[in-house]
Amino acid sequence: MDLKSRIQKLKAEIPAVFLSLKDNETPLIAKFFAAITVAYALSPVDLIPDFIPVLGYLDDLILLPAFIALTIRFIPKPVWEKNLALAIDLWKDGKPQKWYYAVPIILFWVVVIWLIVKAIWL
């Protein structure tokens, strides 16, 4: 599998993991791993900082796919296939069709930034 197709696959799998996290049919252990995976994917903090040459991007190329693969193992196959189909549907024509799914993420980062600013200025 070439790099471009792998990136396309990851582009669909990350939202599918998030959708599986919200799915009532997903077991608790799978939700635990899904929460870790989504948090790592969205986190600006990496285990190995990106400014370290080669190694910085290596964690994104190895750890994120590993987290996704581990999470998928705990999600029942029918649940995963349903959520993967929904995730692929989100990216029709190369851009998100349901952009409002980003609202909770944006609100989360606004709250985090607000808390940091509040902590610094008090």
Image (cartoon, rainbow, N blue to C red):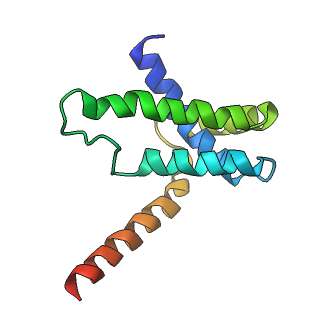
Of residue 92 and residue 47, the one placed in the foreground of this image is 47
User: In the image, is 26 to the left or to the right of 67?
Assistant: right
Instruction: Give the number of marks.
Output: 0
Q: Is residue 93 visible?
A: no
As drawn, 20 above or below 6: below
Image location of residue 122, percent across then percent down: 23, 89
In the current view of this chain or complex, which residue is farthest to the bottom?
A: 122
| In the foreground, 50 or 20 | 50
- Work out which residue is located at the far top of the displayed protein and give it: 1
Residue sitting at 81 percent across and 48 percent down? 25
* Residue plotted at (43% across, 62% down): 106
Residue appearing at x 21%, y 85% in the figure: 121
User: Residue 68 location in percent, x, y?
Assistant: 56, 34
Q: Residue at x 69, y 31 (%)?
A: 73
Residue 110 % position (x, y): 38, 69
Quick check: 57 left or right of 100?
Answer: left
Q: Position of residue 14 (x, y in %)?
A: 54, 39
Q: Is residue 16 left or right of residue 119?
A: right
Occupied quadrant, residue 59: top left
Q: Give the answer, above or below, for where 114 lies relative to 35.
A: below
